[in-house]
Amino acid sequence: MAHRTPLTNHHADGTLCPADHKHTSSGKPLHTDCPGRAYTRTVCSCDWKKEESGKGYVNECRKRHLASHAQGQNAPSAV
């Protein structure tokens, strides 16, 4: 089974930040109606989760997690 771990961006109030809302690397909005990215979340189809303010960090954790599936290891627990 192929595991999936999509990244989603969220505003500070917990609402989903649409994909067409672009941000600077620090999360400041480039879209006039966006309050900014407060955090990024990824949830794997195996129920592993990661949520942090740094999008790059979440993406790196996501890649390591997917690699653990590819190597046939047990999925690491959420940190």
Image (cartoon, rainbow, N blue to C red):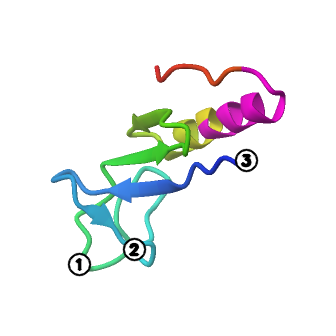
Q: What residue type is labelled 1?
A: Asp
The answer for how far apart the CA atoms under marks 2 and 3 are is: 32 Å
Circles 1, 2 touching at the beta carbon (< 8 Å): yes
- Magenta stretch secondary structure, dominant: helix
Mark 2 = which residue? 21
- Examine the structure image and report whether residue 29 is included in the region drawn in magenta: no
Residue range in magenta is 62-73
Q: Position of residue 66 (x, y in %)?
A: 70, 38
Residue occupying image coordinates x 55% and y 36%:
57
Q: Where is residue 41 in the image (x, y as percent from the top left)?
A: 42, 46
- Element marked by disc 1: loop
Residue occupying image coordinates x 68% and y 20%:
74
- Element marked by disc 2: loop
For the view shown, which residue lies furthest in the front direction? 1
Given residues 37 and 44, the one toward you in this image is 44
Q: What residue type is labelled 3?
A: Met
- Element marked by disc 3: loop
- Examine the structure image and report whether residue 72 is included in the region drawn in magenta: yes
Residue 42 relative to residue 12: left or right: right
Residue 17 relative to residue 76: left or right: left
Mark 1 = which residue? 33
The answer for how far apart the CA atoms under marks 1 and 2 are is: 8 Å
Q: Position of residue 73 (x, y in %)?
A: 75, 21
Mark 3 = which residue? 1
Residue occupying image coordinates x 74% and y 33%:
69
Q: Where is residue 49 in the image (x, y as percent from the top left)?
A: 46, 35
Of the two numbered discs 1 and 3 in the rendering, the one whose residue sits closer to the viewer = 3
10 Å neighbourhood of mark 1: few (<14), some, or many (≥20)? few
Residue occupying image coordinates x 42% and y 48%:
40
Residue 22 relative to residue 58: left or right: left
